[in-house]
Image: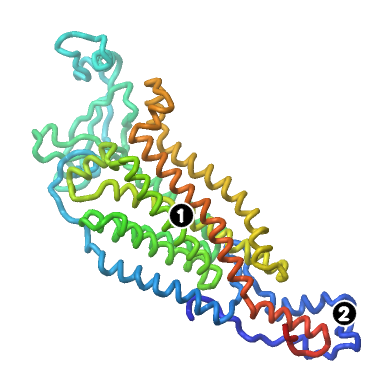
Amino acid sequence: MGLFRSCDDRSVTSSQQTPEPDGRRPGNTDGRADDRAADRSGIHDHGHAHGHGPAAPVSRHLQRVIAAVLIPFATAVAVGLVVLWPGGAPGHERTGVGFDRQTESAKVVRVEQVPCEDVNAGQVPPTGDTSTPEGREAVNSQQGTCGKATVEVTSGKDTGRTFTEIVQPDSTRQLHEGQGVVVAYAPDAPRDLQYSVADVDRQFPMTLLAGIFAIVVVAVGRMRGVMALIALVISFAVLTLFILPAILQGSNPLVVAVVGASAIMLIALYMCHGLSARTSVAVIGTLISLLLIGLLGSLFIGWAALSGNTDDNTGLIHGLYPGIDMSGLLLAGVIIGSLGVLDDVTVTQTSAVWELHQADSTLGPRGLYRAAIRIGRDHIASVVNTLILAYAGASLPLLLLFSIAESGVGTVANSELVAEEIVRTLVGSIGLVASVPVTTALAALVVSADRPARSAGGAAAAVRGGRGRRRKR
């Protein structure tokens, strides 16, 4: 079928030995040598947790059943990619606001320390009122020593041009000589004000960190680490070449997110864990959970009247592309954000079921489910806590602002900024929790119907029985 490893008929080499009258091979007093021989012959050649070994074989009937689900799904995803493929992001006239600015590379060539009042670092309000925060800030800006940085542009048509940047003593970003910076260019401004420092150049430390990450992943994961990195690059390509441009072109964000997330899921799971029935069960479990997240997200985002336009960045997007459905964009973010954790949960649960079946092949679907769901409950507790803390960490500055304002918990939770994160967290967490029993049940049903694997075990038993052929079950 191509999606799964088939159960090949394997010869039991140890069966060629002449059994003793009591049904044991020569020198075998407890029958364990048969199991070791069966292991060597590949009868018990099952995988390990997270797909670190070859997947257990399944019957051709199960191959056809799983393929009947996944092949149409994969075909629909491929068709969706072709139909919705944007061909690049649409162009627009730059506004010069936020990220929508023309930028160039530059370098700080000199920094002088000068009195702030000499460079007019702060302007006291015309009324002379210093009781307001703005007035006090202006007064403080005129006190102390400021940095007068000379910055040289190193890219673009004005390469070699220099300009001056004043850095106040209480500024969070201080400049030093030789530092690389990113400068914003405003062509319509007066010549002396066309360039200004927008950010620090972080390309080298970020590239170095990415290199260390890749080395660690490959050193520990070896070939699977290489495949994981390749899948990561492909996932990022799908995000930047398909999902983002398609949304900017005006396609429905929810449809684009579902198609893009499904493509990422199929590529990442099969590349990292192999083409096997075990991976296919994880794919189906992930798909069901994503559908649940999409339905719940759509319901509660609409019910809570979340617009998705809550900060300067989303406001700029809406201003540049008013046709984008911002609430749909919010839902798309929920789906894509939940996908990475869902992959981990479904693969772990599927692998747990397979390993339990390998340890005790007599367990039926109910026994496998009960054993694996205990593992899943531990996973649920850690994953939900991780997800909530991740969202809380990302929103920490916002939560600090509410704390400074001494707002009550109800007021904070009711604000759209926080309500978005609450809905995002809870919807994603519900999908993650639901993925554990769903995937565990699917895996238990599939592995319990693995007749060829049990027949292979029966072959070893038949050898111990002294007949050299499989017993009928």
- At 35% across and 47% down in the image, what residue appears? 203
Query: Which residue does the numbered mark 2 point to in the structure image?
Result: 28
Q: Residues within 10 Å of mark 2 (few under 14, many from 20)?
A: some
Q: Residue at x 89, y 81 (%)?
A: 27
Q: Locate residue 16: give its quadrant.
A: bottom right
Q: Is residue 232 above or below residue 385?
A: below
Count of numbered marks? 2
> For this rendering, which residue is in front, 47 or 168?
47
Q: Position of residue 238 (x, y in %)?
A: 34, 61
Percent x, y of residue 361: 71, 71
Q: Position of residue 196 (x, y in %)?
A: 20, 34
Judged from the image, the secondary structure of the residue bearing numbered disc 2 is loop
Residue closest to the eye, 137 or 378 = 378
Image quarter where the C terminus lies is: bottom right
Identity, as a three-letter code, of the amino acid under mark 2: Asn
Residue 111 horizontal side relative to residue 212, left or right: left
Expressed as whole percent of the image width and height from the top left, the position of residue 472 reads 73, 86
Residue under circle 1? 340
Q: Earlier in the sequence, mark 1 or mark 2?
A: 2
One can see residue 55 in this view: yes
301 sits left or right of 345 in the view: left
Q: Is residue 227 visible?
A: no
The kind of residue tagged 1 is: Gly
Residue closer to the observer: 135 or 164 = 135
Q: Quick one: label 1, few (<14), some, or many (20+) residues within 10 Å?
A: some
Question: In the displayed structure, does residue 352 sit left or right of residue 84?
Answer: right
Distance in Å between CA atoms under marks 1 and 2:
49 Å
Under circle 1, the secondary element is: helix
